[in-house]
Image (cartoon, rainbow, N blue to C red):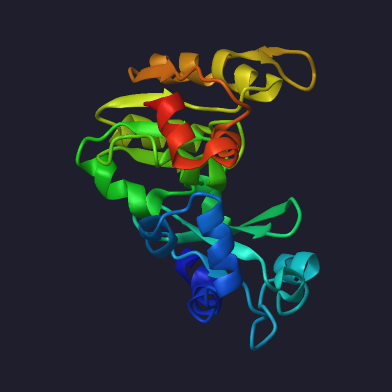
């Protein structure tokens, strides 16, 4: 059963606290209390017993000891099923995402736990690449709107289907201002040189209202680092 795959991870995350050090780091990067609590952000602690999944043990150690002290953001489906997590070292840029088998047929978003009710209520959806882009942008969008992070500059078929099913308003794409982000938005060559459509075209094809949000700065997280909430509101208001 897919649900059984996540039982051990649910228990592990439930036993992880959010340490003061990691919470202070989150606040310094723009995370607000509703996101910290609503997304159940935690600090990873080694498991009490070895993980029952071989690939987890291989990547992170038998009890996940290689993740000790990492900031962990659980990822869930729109129905609340645990799909995995994103783990981030807060001392250096080192990020890993771990996906359970059910992630193969579900959209892997950061931010669904807080954002889903806003989406059901008809709010717009703002799409960014990463967790701290999401945390920063939440200072500059209407409270009724949801900010989701697609983990990288790419929308999967599962992402597109999620948006087609649930989005009643506009979709605002706020990918990074680099070649990868621009190609992901407008289309461009893949690793083999083949031209592929961007997110704007793919969303429009399924009847969704979408736009590219142009802004100055590398990404929303960098805008936050430069000037905090005031900078975000000036750039994205």
Question: Is 179 displayed left or right of 172 in the figure?
Answer: right
Residue 130 screen position, x and y as percent: 57, 42
Viewer-proximal residue among 227 and 205: 227
Viewer-proximal residue among 232 and 101: 232
Who's the residue at 35% across and 34% down the image? 141
Who's the residue at 68% across and 22% down the image? 178
Question: Is 97 displayed left or right of 172 in the figure?
Answer: right
Residue 78 visible (yes or no): no
Who's the residue at 64% across and 82% down the image? 47
> Is the C terminus in the top left, top right, bottom left or bottom right quadrant?
top left
Q: Quadrant of residue 57?
A: bottom right
Q: Is residue 86 above or below residue 154?
A: below
In the rendered image, the residue lying farthest to the bottom is 48
Residue 22 screen position, x and y as percent: 59, 66
In the rendered image, the residue lying farthest to the left is 121
Residue 229 visible (yes or no): yes
Residue 81 screen position, x and y as percent: 42, 61
Q: Is residue 165 above or below residue 181?
A: below
Who's the residue at 25% across and 40% down the image? 144
Q: Quadrant of residue 126?
A: top left
Question: Is 57 displayed left or right of 118 in the figure?
Answer: right
Residue 91 screen position, x and y as percent: 73, 59
Count every numbered label the image shows and give the total: 0
């Amino acid at each position: 059963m897919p649900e059984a795959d996540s039982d051990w991870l649910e228990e592990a995350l439930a036993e992880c606290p959010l340490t003061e050090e990691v919470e202070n780091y989150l606040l310094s990067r723009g995370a607000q209390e509703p996101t910290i609590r609503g997304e159940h952000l935690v600090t990873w602690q080694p498991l009490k017993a070895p993980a029952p999944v071989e690939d987890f043990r291989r990547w992170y150690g038998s009890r996940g000891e290689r993740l000790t002290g990492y900031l962990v953001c659980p990822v869930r489906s729109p129905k609340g099923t645990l799909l995995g997590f994103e783990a981030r070292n807060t001392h250096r840029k080192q990020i890993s995402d771990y996906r359970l088998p059910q992630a193969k047929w579900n959209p892997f978003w950061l931010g669904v736990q807080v954002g889903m009710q806003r989406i059901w209520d008809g709010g717009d959806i703002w799409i960014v690449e990463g967790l701290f882009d999401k945390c920063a942008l939440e200072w500059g969008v209407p409270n009724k709107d949801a900010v989701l992070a697609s983990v990288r500059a790419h929308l999967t078929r599962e992402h597109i289907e999620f948006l087609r099913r649930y989005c009643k308003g506009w979709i605002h794409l706020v990918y990074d201002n680099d070649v990868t982000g621009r190609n992901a938005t407008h289309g461009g060559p893949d690793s083999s040189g083949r031209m592929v459509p961007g997110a704007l075209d793919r969303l429009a094809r399924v009847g969704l209202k979408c736009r590219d949000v142009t802004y100055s700065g590398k990404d929303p997280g960098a805008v936050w680092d430069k000037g905090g909430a005031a900078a975000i509101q000036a750039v994205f208001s």
